[in-house]
Amino acid sequence: TTIIGAVSSLNDENISGNKILLDKLLEEINIAADRLHRLVENLLDMTRLESGNLKPKLDLYPVADLINAVLKRFDKELKERLIKVAIPEDMPLVKYDFGLMEQALANIIHNSLEYSHDQSEITIEVKLIQDNCVINISDNGKGFPVEMLEKIFDKFYRVQNGLVHETKGAGLGLSIVKSIVDAHKGEINVQSTEGEGSCFELKFKGI
């Protein structure tokens, strides 16, 4: 609707000749197009995961490369956030599907961006615990109500409360994260305090 309305407005000579209004419309189209692109990607990923046609192609990779690839996706959005990354210097190569795990972490980062404010902090911490690669992604954003945490990974579920009603999405991002982690025979957990932030923990056998 945003894209159609903005494009329709471009046909108005009073708007097309006004650079300020024109730039605003183009920005709205760009934001809406990115959101639509993300939705289509999530729908396609969920379809492949549920059909069983998407199998992890495991190989050994540096976790630092994975984190850098994910953060690069959000260059523009993260400029308004404080990002902290902690990876042990002696962290060995870890076995995972690079593309799938990149998508999983990207969905969590996107979630943190949606439920936090400018100048907030996002921390990514990597550990090796008994041959398991553990990745914690935490923020000091709005958090989630305790009663909703058990549903947060359900398909099409969106948190609805006074803190987060303004966010937009189809409720697929975190369910895809869980499906990807499950495909790696791993675990994902979330801890959250409403009004203070959330921490997602991914754990999978990587060595």
Image (tube, rainbow, N blue to C red):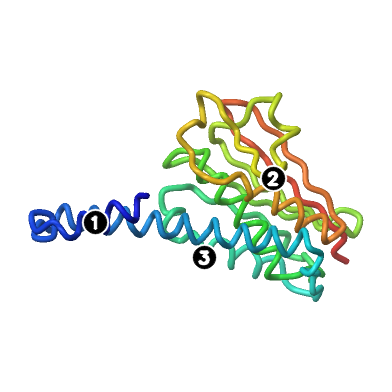
Q: Mark 1 points at which residue?
A: 8
Q: Where is residue 80 in the image (x, y as percent from the top left)?
A: 41, 48
Q: Is mark 2 on a helix, strand or loop?
A: loop
Q: Position of residue 38 (x, y in %)?
A: 53, 58
Q: Distance between the residues labelled 2 and 3?
A: 27 Å
Q: Which residue is drawn at 72% across and 42% down?
A: 153
Residue type (three-letter) at the residue carrying disc 2: Lys
Q: Where is residue 87 in the image (x, y as percent from the top left)?
A: 69, 59
Q: Which residue is drawn at 80% across and 76% down?
A: 59
Residue located farthest toward the right when viewing the structure as drawn: 130
Q: Mark 3 points at which residue?
A: 72
Around disc 2, counting alpha carbons within 10 Å, would you say few (fewer than 14), some (14 to 19), or many (20 or more)? some
Q: Which residue is drawn at 74% across and 73% down?
A: 61
Which comes before the other along the chain, label 2 or label 3? 3
Q: Mark 2 points at which residue?
A: 155
Q: In this view, does 13 lie to the left or right of 142?
A: left
Judging depth in this view, the residue of 172 and 23 nearest the camera is 172
Q: Where is residue 72 in the image (x, y as percent from the top left)?
A: 52, 65
Around disc 3, counting alpha carbons within 10 Å, would you say few (fewer than 14), some (14 to 19), or many (20 or more)? few
Q: Which residue is drawn at 70% across and 53% down?
A: 177
Callout 2 touching callout 1 (CB < 8 Å): no
**Is 114 above or below relative to 59?**
above
Q: Is mark 3 on a helix, strand or loop?
A: helix
Residue type (three-letter) at the residue carrying disc 3: Lys
Residue 71 occupies quadrant: bottom right
Q: Distance between the residues labelled 1 and 3?
A: 33 Å
Residue type (three-letter) at the residue carrying disc 1: Ser
Which comes before the other along the chain, label 1 or label 3? 1
Around disc 1, counting alpha carbons within 10 Å, would you say few (fewer than 14), some (14 to 19), or many (20 or more)? few
